[in-house]
Image: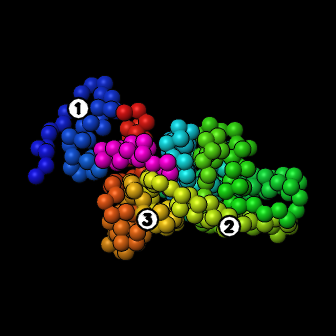
């Protein structure tokens, strides 16, 4: 038996701190998980020298991008594992791409005819996405070839950082990563506009991408870590790559998942932390929690709780 449930009350001019404590009192159902997630992240912030932030690219198309970059500037995390889409959206938005408020129930045929991509309820003009990413990536790669000579080898992290150094946008994730010294690993780097731009540039220029250098760095991080904690937002390759390398540490010591996926289809995206224990991706006895919900709603509350309470 645990503590007795306490009824919560709202009051005028309530602070976020008060809301978080209210979640702790409400307890059922995801309220308690949000409350626990904040406590877990605060604990591994103070105890772990290796703190991983893993997220999918879709959230970088939203205003949550600014919160993610803030977490990096505050050095709450010191390793990022993400998807190609995150790099795409950050580049596009950093270099003038206009991402507009839209709606889910749109006329997608009409949007297509007007040259507008739809990402959920976000509208992205075609000209503000792929062409910008290609132009920026080709420009940066051209500068690197001119500076270092043809044929030089770069890791994906190297290139991502080179782009981040050229960004003048305080909300940019890549810029925040560079300014805080946080490496950004993109295991699925070919799966998007960034990767395609690397490919098209390579067709006319001598440049080498050493994907194993990124993996070597991740191996060093995993094998040398004394304590590892991770906030994993969403699923897919960014979640799996985080857990995959964690197993070489013996598993994460702390894990917080924020997801909308369920486990009943056997997917990695929906798999809960206890399943990861069987793969040695999370340690037996590790502190972990899953928060089910939209990251754009959940993450600002968790981030505030960790940074300011």
Give the residue at mark 1. 10
Determine which residue is flagged by label 2: 211
Relative depth, front residue between 112 and 152: 152
The numbered mark, 3 or 1, whose residue comes first in the sequence reads 1
Q: Distance of mark 3 from mark 2, alpha carbons?
A: 24 Å
Q: Is residue 301 left or right of residue 53?
A: left
Highlighted magenta segment, given as a residue range = 34-55
Residue found 27% across the figure and 47% down from its top = 31
> Callout 1: 10 Å neighbours few (<14), some, many (20+)?
few
Disc 2: CA contacts within 10 A as few (<14), some (14-19) or many (>=20) = some
Q: Are marks 2 and 1 in contact (CB under 8 Å)?
A: no
- Residue 220 in percent (x, y) is at 59, 60
* For residue 138, side relative to residue 19 (left or right): right
Label annotation for residue 250: 3
**Which callout, 3 or 1, points to the residue nearer the camera?**
3
- Residue at 75% x, 55% y: name it: 137
Residue at the image point whose x is 89% and y is 58% from the top: 149
Secondary structure category for the residue under label 1 = loop
Q: Nearer the viewer, residue 151 or 302?
A: 151
Q: Residue at x 42, y 45 (%)?
A: 47
- Specify the principal SS of the magenta part: helix
Could you say which is closer to the camera, residue 43 or residue 185? Answer: 43
- The residue at the far top in this view is 13
């Amino acid at each position: 038996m645990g503590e007795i449930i306490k009824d919560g009350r709202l009051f005028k001019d309530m602070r976020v701190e008060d809301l978080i404590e209210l979640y702790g009192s409400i307890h059922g159902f995801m309220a308690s998980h949000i409350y626990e997630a904040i406590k877990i992240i605060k604990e591994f912030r103070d105890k772990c020298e290796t703190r991983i932030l893993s997220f999918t690219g879709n959230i970088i198309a939203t205003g949550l991008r600014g919160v993610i970059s803030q977490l990096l500037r505050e050095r709450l995390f010191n390793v990022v594992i993400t998807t190609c889409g995150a790099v795409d959206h950050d580049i596009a938005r950093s270099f003038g791409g206009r991402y507009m408020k839209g709606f889910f129930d749109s006329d997608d045929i009409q949007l297509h005819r007007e040259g507008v991509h739809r990402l959920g309820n976000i509208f992205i003009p075609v000209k503000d996405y792929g062409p910008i990413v290609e132009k920026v990536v080709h420009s940066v790669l051209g500068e690197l070839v001119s500076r270092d000579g043809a044929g030089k080898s770069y890791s994906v992290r190297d290139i991502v950082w080179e782009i981040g150094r050229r960004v003048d946008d305080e909300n940019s994730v890549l810029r925040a990563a560079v300014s805080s010294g946080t490496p950004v690993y993109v295991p699925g780097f070919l799966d998007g506009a960034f990767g395609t731009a690397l490919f098209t540039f390579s067709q006319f220029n001598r440049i080498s991408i050493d994907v194993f250098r990124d993996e070597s760095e991740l191996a060093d991080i995993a094998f040398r870590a004394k304590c590892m904690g991770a906030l994993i937002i969403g699923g897919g390759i960014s979640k799996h790559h985080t857990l995959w390398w964690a197993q070489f540490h013996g598993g994460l010591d702390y894990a917080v998942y924020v997801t909308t996926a369920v486990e009943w289809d056997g997917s990695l995206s929906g798999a809960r932390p206890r399943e990861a224990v069987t793969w040695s991706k999370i340690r037996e006895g590790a502190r972990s929690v899953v928060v089910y919900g939209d990251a754009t709603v959940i993450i600002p509350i968790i981030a505030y709780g960790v940074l300011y309470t």
